[in-house]
Amino acid sequence: MGWTLTLMRASLRKIGEHRRLALFPAVSGVATTVLVVATVLPTVNQLRSAVSWALIAVGYFLFSLVTIFCNAALVYAANLALRGEDVTMAAGFRGAARRFGGIAWWTLISCTVSLLLRALSAVRLGGLVEVVLGLAWHLTTYLVIPLIVVEQNTVPRALRRSRDTLRRTWGANVRGSVGIALVLMLAALCGVAVLVGIGALLNLLALNTAIAFAAVGTGVLVWLVFLSVLGGTISAVFRIVLYRFAIEGSTAPQFRDLDLSTAFD
C-alpha cells in the first residue's frame, strides 16, 4: 500500500501541474452518457427486434470507441506532461486522431475479447476462468494504447511489444492497477459513509427528509464522479510512466522513488 500511495502522490503532483489532464475523463463520461441515451435506452423495451440488437451492438462499439479514444488522448497528453511540454486538450485529441484507425481496430479487438470472456461466465467455473483470462489479457495489453499513440505502432506490433514487456513490468503493473483501484474504492466507501452520516444527522435535526435525501444523493453522485475522473487520470499517468520505463528506460523525476523494476519485494 505504501508503494501505491507514493505512486498516487506523485501522479497527483503531476496532475496538479497539468490540470487539463483531468478534463479528458470528464469529456469521455459526458460523451459516453450521450451515446447510451441515444442508442441503448430507446431499445430497452424492444429487445426482441433484430434491429434493436444491432443498434445495441453498434452502441456498444461506439461507447467503447469513445472511451478508448479519450483514454488514448489522455495518455498522449500525459506523455507530453512527463516530457515537460505544454498540455492542451487539442494536443491530446490531435495525437489520438492521428492514430484513429489503429484505435478503432484496437476497440474492435477489445470489444470482441470482452464479449468472449463474458460468454465464458455461462459455463461451469466460467466465472473463475473469465477472471483469470481477463487479468492475463489486462496485463498483456496494458501498454497497447501508449504503443499505438506515442510510437504509432500498428495494432499487431503494439500487441507483440506490450506482451514482450510483460516480464519486466508485470509486478508494477499489478501493484499499480490493483492498488489504485483499492485506494479509490476505500475513498468511495468512506465518502459515501460520511455523506450518509450527514444525511442521518440532518434527518435527526428534523429537517425535511426529502431535502436531506436529495442532498445526500447529490453529494454521493458528485463524489463518485470526482473519484472516477481522478482515478482515470491517475491510471493514465501511471500507464505512461510504466511505458516510458519499459520502452525507453526512463523515469520522470516525480516517480524516481518508485522501483518499477521489481514485483512484490
Image (tube, grey):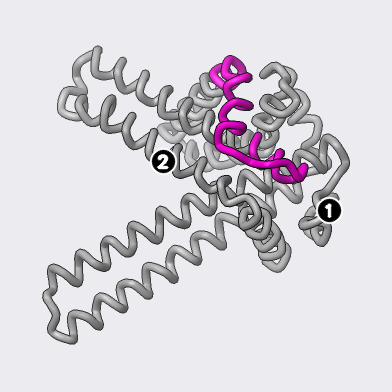
Q: Position of residue 7 (x, y in %)?
A: 70, 59
Q: Is residue 114 above or below residue 175?
A: above
Q: Nearer the viewer, residue 117 or 13?
A: 13
Give the number of the disc on residue 29: 2
Give the tally of numbered discs: 2
Report the predominant secondary structure element of the magenta stretch: helix
Furthest-bottom residue in this view: 205
Give the number of the disc on residue 58: none
Amino acid on which the number 1 mark rests in the picture: Thr
- Write down the residue under mark 1: 262
Q: Residues within 10 Å of mark 1 (few under 14, many from 20)?
A: few
Is disc 1 placed on a helix, strand or loop?
loop
Q: Position of residue 215 (x, y in %)?
A: 24, 67
Image quadrant occupied by the C terminus: bottom right
Estimate the spatial distance between the alpha carbons at disc 2 and disc 1, rounded to whole Å.
Answer: 34 Å
Specify the segment rendered in magenta: 76-105
Q: Position of residue 145 (x, y in %)?
A: 65, 30
Q: Residues within 10 Å of mark 2 (few under 14, many from 20)?
A: some
Residue at image coords 79%, 53%: 263
Amino acid on which the number 2 mark rests in the picture: Gly
Is disc 2 placed on a helix, strand or loop?
helix
Q: Nearer the viewer, residue 82 or 219?
A: 82
Residue at image coords 16%, 69%: 211
